[in-house]
Amino acid sequence: IMNYYFDNKNLMLITSYIFIIFYSFIFQIPALIALGTFIAGLFSFFYLNKISFSSNYLALSIITFFICIPAFFKLFHGWTPLFYLFSTLITIVSVSKILTNPDRIILKAIRIIYSSFILFIIYLIIINRNQIHPFEEAMPGTSTNGIPSYLIILQSSLSIFNYRVNNKLPYFSPLITFIVCIIGIGRSSLVISFLILIGTFYFNFITSRNKINSKSLLISFVIIIGIYFLGLEVYENIFRITKLSAGFELYHRSKLLNAYLNNMNFIDLIIGKDYSGSIIEFVYYNNPHNSLIRAHSYMGLPYFLTIILSPFIIIFQNYNYKYKIMITFFSLALIARSFTDPILFPTLLDFFYFLNIFPRQINI
């Protein structure tokens, strides 16, 4: 009975924390993001401190602080880099404590947040049903690509912890995520969600002891039959209604990247470069539309390299090769998705990325 009580108490606390982290960010309101960061910090300090804390994660937080030292030299960005440094430290500390809970509790919490977001998306679709693109300006300050991007981040954590608990990736939620990305019309989200869907089937197949089971056969059969009957019509409609019709060349993103790299000197390379005098400032209002550009500009080269190399940290952990492949796949998927939108690095949603890749002493 006591275990049941503590499990439910921790589930409530973890779900509340993730809820604050997630929903305070997705509306893209600066005041709400600041409030969410402040509440998350208090929540982490006063409530999660009862969970055992590993000195390894304290060391990791200190290392992270020194990695982000260039943030103190960003007078051209004002207080923004320091704010994100603070939020990064909060997410690292909170992840380290949350990971001391059983995986099944964390999985339940992620499922609750994922389900709540799906219900919110359904609500947006209903109230904007007369629009061609129901996510267009559905939330002030959020692009049509924002909602699918946030769902992909949730999907990555949901898939990873489902594997931790059930030793397989979920089938249904990646399909739902893919459908939402089709509605969202964005190329990057659509491609990444499709890769996650295909990767889920492939990973479950190659890691299955029986290789083929009845559930996999049934789902595969339904998909094959559906593709056969819908054929090219589905293919043509998806390309017609989404931005895939414009091809895969990211012309505007390339212009932003070139604008940032132009005239970069050695000091800029180490501590990061501002956007002044570039199209990022005058045309895109200081939004580089690229998490990695913003990561380097705010935090400098050490932070940038840490993010780029982070998917491969898992290789040196004491896990089996199947788990390492899965974590690396989802980490690279999130980095690829963040390359065309500033959804991670550094944001409050880094919480989910750290939750995915941080090591823990469990037998996987």
Image (cartoon, grey):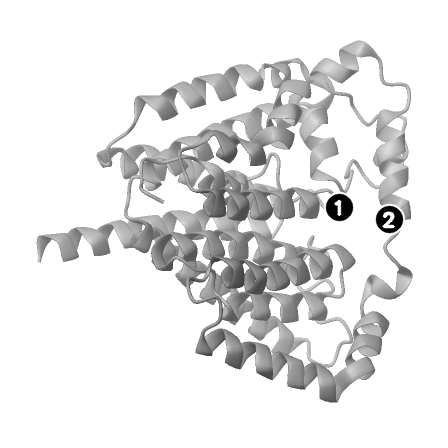
Q: Quadrant of residue 180?
A: bottom right
Circle 1: element type: loop
Q: Amino acid at mark 1?
A: Thr
Q: Amino acid at mark 2?
A: Leu
Residue 97 horizontal side relative to residue 287, left or right: left
> In the picture shown, does residue 80 fall above or below 130?
above
Task: Where is residue 278? Give x, y as percent.
Answer: 89, 30
Task: Where is residue 202? Give x, y as percent.
Answer: 58, 61
Residue 338 horizontal side relative to residue 67, left or right: right
Q: Residue at x 64, y 48 (%)?
A: 333
Residue under pointer 2:
250
Residue under pointer 1:
340
Residue 135, visible in the rendered structure? no
Task: Where is residue 215? Give x, y as percent.
Answer: 46, 77
Residue 69, visible in the rendered structure? yes
Label 1: how many Cα within 10 Å (few below 14, some 14–19, many 20+): many
Task: Where is residue 82? Give x, y as percent.
Answer: 58, 23
Residue 69 horizontal side relative to residue 233, left or right: left
- Residue reaching furthest to the front: 210
- Residue reaching furthest to the left: 1
